[in-house]
Image (tube, helix red, strand yellow):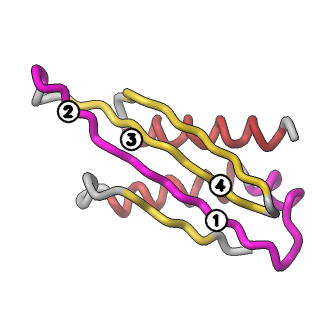
Amino acid sequence: MTPHIIFHIADFDNERDMITEIVGRNLDKKLDSYLKKLTKNDDEIRVEATLTRDVKKWEKARSTFSGKVILSVAGKTFRSERKEFETIEDLINHLFDHIKTQIGSK
């Protein structure tokens, strides 16, 4: 049950390792029991994460972050999209919280 993770994070060359670690932690800790209930041994888990840096023209020294996560598992797709977070970690954690809520309601 190893997930196939696709990252769209062109704006984050320096933060790539940190983003990979945060996404992995969310899958392992936050969604692990939910994914086990949804999958059988041969089911593929696919995660697609897109993150962008939002730089406002009048505030070049400060930027916020936006992103979306699409999780496909056992023929079901779950999607979360959020905008204007102060930190990358908060954004990613929040995206996975919403995915968890969606899975829990099924």
The crowd level at tag 1 (other Cα within 10 Å; few <14, some 14-19, many 20+) is some
**Given the image, on which type of amino acid does mark 3 rest?**
Ile
* Marked residue nearer the N-terminal end (1 or 4): 1
- Label 3 to label 1, Cα distance in Å? 21 Å
The CA distance from mark 2 to mark 3 is 14 Å
Residue at 67%, 59% in the rendered image: 28
Q: Alpha carbon of mark 2 to alpha carbon of mark 1: how far?
A: 29 Å
Q: Is residue 44 magenta?
A: yes
SS of the residue under disc 1: strand
Residue that badge 3 annotates: 88
Query: Label 4 amino acid?
Result: Leu
Residue ID at (54%, 67%): 5
Label 4 Cα crowd, 10 Å radius (few <14 / some 14-19 / many 20+): many
> From the viewer's perspective, is 93 left or right of 45?
left
Residue linked to disc 2: 55
| Classed neighbour count for the residue bearing mark 3: other residues with Cα under 10 Å, few (<14), some (14–19), many (≥20) | many
The reply to whether dot 1 and dot 4 touch (C-beta < 8 Å) is yes
- Tell me the residue that label 1 is attached to: 46
Extent of the magenta region: 32-59
Q: Quadrant of the N terminus?
A: bottom right
Quadrant occupied by the C terminus: top right
